[in-house]
């Protein structure tokens, strides 16, 4: 349920209404707006009897929201959310297209530093790199773990780049948050609800990838877990879904980007590397994501993809990323001017 207040509603009115909601056994969430304040009501499992609120002169309208996700819904928050990463880079709304790039896995200091210096020169503000690597096969490279975190922290301090890495366990939240700027929830952990709860308590932005076969409702429901636990800085990431098709690693569901943007105020970015699994398909789909309204792209790049310990076939060479960034900037400028 969403309670929209009149222009004249005072801070005292807001507090009184919140007290009524608490007495109803529910949780009020104030949503300040440019023109008026609204109060979201969460915690209900079905229809809410609004009798106790009717007749309150401070209330303009009561809207019953039937979606299972509420805080992430545009019903609760009509305006686009702009998430600030590391206190300096914005994503969402009308912010510039965000570029995130880096290797699938942190392999060594040399590999990571070489990539970071290249990205900084290219103007890419966020470095990605996996320290903990959940892999389909237990025989595959599992990452440098705490050693990888240390290298990420070292590189961000030396280069000034923001750093994002995947977090795979609730027990790792504190140590990962201490060493990076942005937390990532991978596709396999999208419905790890204990993990979602813990990152919701962390004071770091979160990139939430869509699960392998997750519906939109399930994806937004996972985002709701993070917001309910106090963290509003969530960026959704479409990375392809599993279908009958085996020609590509996953099926790139680009149509879901404009669709989800109608349902939620949260920023949405695209991962063409995992969506396609093929180096020659990364650039075309990344460019397509600009046209359909993506707020950014997360792309795998490696100094030597042919010898990468993880995801080499879908990682771009430096020169390929350089060309792609130039084309993305040109396309973004064109779409903003003409579309």
Image (spheres, rainbow, N blue to C red):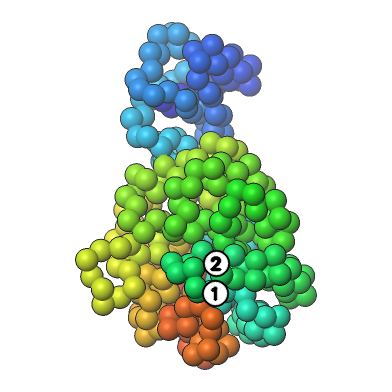
Q: Label 2 belongs to which residue?
A: 133
Q: CA distance from mark 1 to mark 2?
A: 7 Å
- Residue at image location 37% in from the left, 70% down from the top: 275
- Residue at image location 56% in from the left, 34% down from the top: 32
Occupied quadrant, residue 328: bottom left
Q: Mark 1 near mark 2, Cβ–Cβ under 8 Å?
A: yes
- Residue 33 in the image: state x and y as whole percent: 54, 36
- Residue at image location 37% in from the left, 85% down from the top: 280
- Residue 24 in the image: state x and y as whole percent: 49, 13
The residue lying toward the viewer, choosing from 200 and 324, is 200
- Residue 54 in the image: state x and y as whole percent: 42, 10
Q: Is residue 260 visible?
A: yes
Occupied quadrant, residue 229: top right
Q: Residues within 10 Å of mark 2 (few under 14, many from 20)?
A: many
Q: Which mark is residue 141?
A: 1
The residue lying toward the viewer, choosing from 166 and 71, is 166
Q: Is residue 125 visible?
A: no
Which structural element holds mark 2?
A: loop
Q: Is residue 43 left or right of residue 168?
A: left
Which structural element holds mark 1?
A: loop
Q: Earlier in the sequence, mark 1 or mark 2?
A: 2
Q: Is residue 255 left or right of residue 201?
A: left
Q: Is residue 92 left or right of residue 152?
A: left
């Amino acid at each position: 349920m969403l309670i929209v207040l009149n222009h004249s509603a005072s801070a005292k009115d807001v507090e009184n209404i919140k007290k009524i909601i608490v007495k109803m056994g529910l949780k009020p969430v104030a949503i300040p707006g440019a023109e008026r304040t609204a109060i979201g009501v969460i915690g209900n499992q079905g229809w809410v009897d609004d009798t106790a609120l009717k007749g309150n002169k401070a209330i303009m309208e009561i809207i019953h929201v039937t979606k299972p996700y509420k805080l992430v819904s545009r019903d609760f928050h009509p305006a686009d959310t702009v998430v600030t990463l590391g206190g300096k880079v914005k994503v969402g709304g009308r912010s510039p297209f965000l570029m995130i790039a880096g290797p699938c896995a942190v392999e060594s200091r040399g590999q990571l530093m070489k990539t970071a210096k290249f990205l900084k020169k290219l103007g890419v503000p966020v470095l990605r790199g996996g320290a903990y690597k959940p892999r389909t096969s237990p025989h595959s490279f599992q990452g440098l773990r705490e050693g990888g975190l240390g290298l990420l922290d070292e590189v961000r301090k030396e280069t000034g780049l923001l750093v994002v890495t995947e977090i795979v366990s609730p027990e790792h939240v504190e140590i990962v948050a201490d060493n990076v700027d942005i937390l990532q929830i991978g596709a396999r952990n999208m419905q790890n609800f204990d993990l979602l709860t813990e990152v919701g308590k962390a004071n770091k932005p979160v990139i939430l990838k869509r699960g392998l076969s997750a519906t939109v409702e399930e994806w937004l429901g996972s985002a709701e877990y993070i917001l309910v636990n106090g963290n509003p800085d969530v960026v959704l990431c479409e990375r392809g879904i599993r279908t009958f098709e085996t020609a590509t690693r996953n099926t790139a569901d680009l149509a879901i980007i404009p669709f989800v943007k109608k349902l939620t105020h949260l920023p949405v970015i695209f991962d063409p590397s995992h969506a396609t699994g093929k180096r020659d398909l990364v650039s075309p789909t990344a460019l397509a994501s600009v046209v359909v309204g993506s707020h950014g792209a997360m792309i795998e790049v490696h100094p030597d993809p042919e010898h990468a310990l993880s995801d080499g076939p879908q990682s771009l060479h430096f020169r390929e990323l350089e060309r792609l960034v130039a084309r993305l900037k040109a396309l973004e400028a064109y779409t903003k001017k003409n579309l």
